[in-house]
């Protein structure tokens, strides 16, 4: 059997395995409604790890049409937002912070994702609905690249410019449904 055919068959086997292990698709936001709690692990470049208690509560829509989306860090840092449906067919939503900040967010598979820039930092926030809860991953990177590479012509190929960014902080949590 040729190497190429062996690799192709291996890829098909992996695809079947992934498909068979795949969890159900949770209807958003209705099947996300509930209270979730867990520990948020904060990893920074000094290898210190901080642990913060985290809660996420998603409630049924209120009179204004928002799904209350409340995040709590520790005992006293409570952030009450509103989830607004913009175009459910395209997976487009907004998290309204009710202070003139509105974050466009997108549903892809069981992932609810926001990517935004604030105070010279880029943040990528990914909430993944899984069996028993929500996995949260937050990536913080600097808005300015640490290096630029590429942007050359090699032979007949034009190599695009590639910017690399420092990622000084990563946070993750598994929030168990209560």
Image: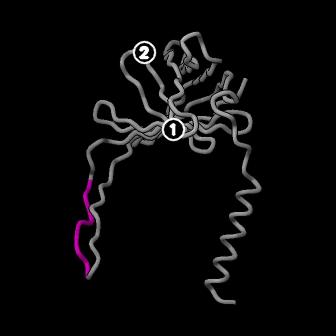
Q: What mark, if any, has residue 98 been given in the picture?
A: 2
Is 166 above or below relative to 58? below
> At 32% across and 54% down in the image, what residue appears?
164
Report the magenta residues as a range.
Answer: 147-155
The furthest residue to the top: 63
> At 63% across and 29% down in the image, what residue appears?
29
Membership of 150 in magenta stretch: yes
Q: How far from the left and from the top, in percent, is residue 132?
A: 74, 34
**Alpha carbon distance from label 2 to label 1:** 19 Å
Snapshot quadrant of residue 74: top right
Q: How far from the left and from the top, in percent, is residue 63?
A: 58, 10
Q: How far from the left and from the top, in percent, is residue 15?
A: 69, 63
Q: Earlier in the sequence, mark 2 or mark 1?
A: 2
The furthest residue to the left: 152
Look at the numbered disc 1 and give the secondary structure of its residue.
strand
Would you name the residue on which mark 1 appears? Answer: 106
Classify residue 52 as left or right of residue 162.
right
Q: How far from the left and from the top, in percent, is residue 69?
A: 56, 21
Looking at the image, can residue 154 be seen? Answer: yes
Membership of 103 in magenta stretch: no
Q: Nearer the viewer, residue 113 or 64?
A: 64
Q: Residues within 10 Å of mark 2 (few under 14, many from 20)?
A: few
Report the magenta stretch's main SS: strand
Q: Residues within 10 Å of mark 1 (few under 14, many from 20)?
A: many
Q: Nearer the viewer, residue 6 or 98?
A: 98
């Amino acid at each position: 059997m040729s190497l190429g055919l062996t690799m192709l068959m291996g890829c098909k086997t992996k695809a079947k395995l992934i498909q068979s292990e795949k969890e159900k698709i949770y209807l958003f936001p209705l099947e996300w409604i509930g209270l979730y709690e867990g520990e948020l692990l904060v990893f920074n470049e000094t290898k210190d790890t901080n642990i913060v208690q985290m809660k996420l509560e998603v409630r049924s829509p209120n009179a204004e049409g928002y799904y209350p989306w409340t995040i709590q860090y520790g005992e006293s840092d409570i952030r009450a937002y509103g989830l607004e449906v913009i175009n459910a067919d395209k997976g487009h939503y907004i998290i309204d912070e009710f202070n003139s900040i509105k974050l466009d967010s997108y549903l892809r598979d069981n992932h609810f994702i926001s990517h935004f820039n604030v105070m010279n930092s880029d943040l990528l926030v990914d909430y993944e609905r899984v069996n028993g809860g929500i996995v949260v991953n937050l990536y913080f990177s600097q808005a300015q690249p640490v290096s630029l590479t590429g942007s050359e012509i090699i032979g007949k190929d034009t190599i695009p410019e590639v910017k690399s960014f420092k990622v000084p902080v990563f946070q993750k949590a598994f929030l168990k449904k209560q």
